[in-house]
Amino acid sequence: MQIGRITPPYPYAPYGPYPPPPPEATTPSSESNAAETIVPPRPKRLDWTAAEEEKLVHVWIFNSKDSVAGNCKTDTSFWGQIAETFNSTSEPACRRTSKQLKDHWNAYNKEVSLFNGYYIQESGLRQSGADDDMVMKAAMERYAADKRVTHPFRRHHWWEVVRNEAKWKGQHGPSSGTDST
């Protein structure tokens, strides 16, 4: 009778003593075995291009306006569809996961929304004789003066795509008459 370790009913049981590591996970004893355990380098991180960001914005708008499914999509389903559409026209080496797309959208959409708010405010304050360039300059100055901002606004390509969409038009607010306060 062997007295010693009792092995659990399956190899990685969440209780009791654990089995010894598999032989391939132990330290290699020969040089030929050492070459097999080298982990390949991680692929280089892909930086986002302006074209990819515009593509993400267009895909987001397309999927958010889906009249068949409407807004009855779960977060996972919505971003999964965005990833599928986004990757359908991407090179295999440039594909993005739904998490990457969602994280990028959430990070930079805040900047675009903040700038858009300043642009809408400046458009409402437009003086007689002021042109679009003057409104843009005033909005850029207000954006740069915001204490939450650490760099100048760089997502003009993103903003140009979304600025005329209903969500970004600023139809609801203090001056629209639809505010409950």
Image: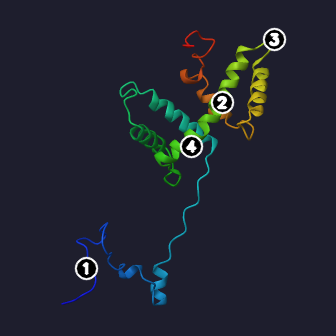
Q: Nearer the viewer, residue 38 or 122?
A: 122
As measured in the structure, the alpha-carbon distance from the residue carrying label 4 to the one carrying label 1 is: 49 Å
Residue drawn at (45%, 90%) of the image? 29
Residue 72: % across, % down? 37, 29
- Up/down of 38 relative to 138, above or below: below
Q: Label 1 amino acid?
A: Ile
Q: Name the N-terminal-most of marks 1 and 3.
A: 1
Pair 2/1: label in front: 1
Residue 14: % across, % down? 32, 66
Quadrant location of residue 162? top right
User: In which quadrant is the N terminus drawn?
Assistant: bottom left
Residue furthest toward the left?
1
Residue underneath mark 2: 114
Residue underneath mark 1: 6
Quadrant location of residue 74? top left
Q: Name the N-terminal-most of marks 2 and 1.
A: 1
Residue underneath mark 4: 104
Residue 106: % across, % down? 56, 39
Q: Residues within 10 Å of mark 4 (few under 14, many from 20)?
A: some
Pair 4/1: label in front: 1
Q: Label 3 amino acid?
A: Gly
As measured in the structure, the alpha-carbon distance from the residue carrying label 2 to the one carrying label 1 is: 62 Å
- Up/down of 80 relative to 130, above or below: below
Q: Name the N-terminal-most of marks 2 and 3.
A: 2
As measured in the structure, the alpha-carbon distance from the residue carrying label 2 to the one carrying label 3 is: 26 Å
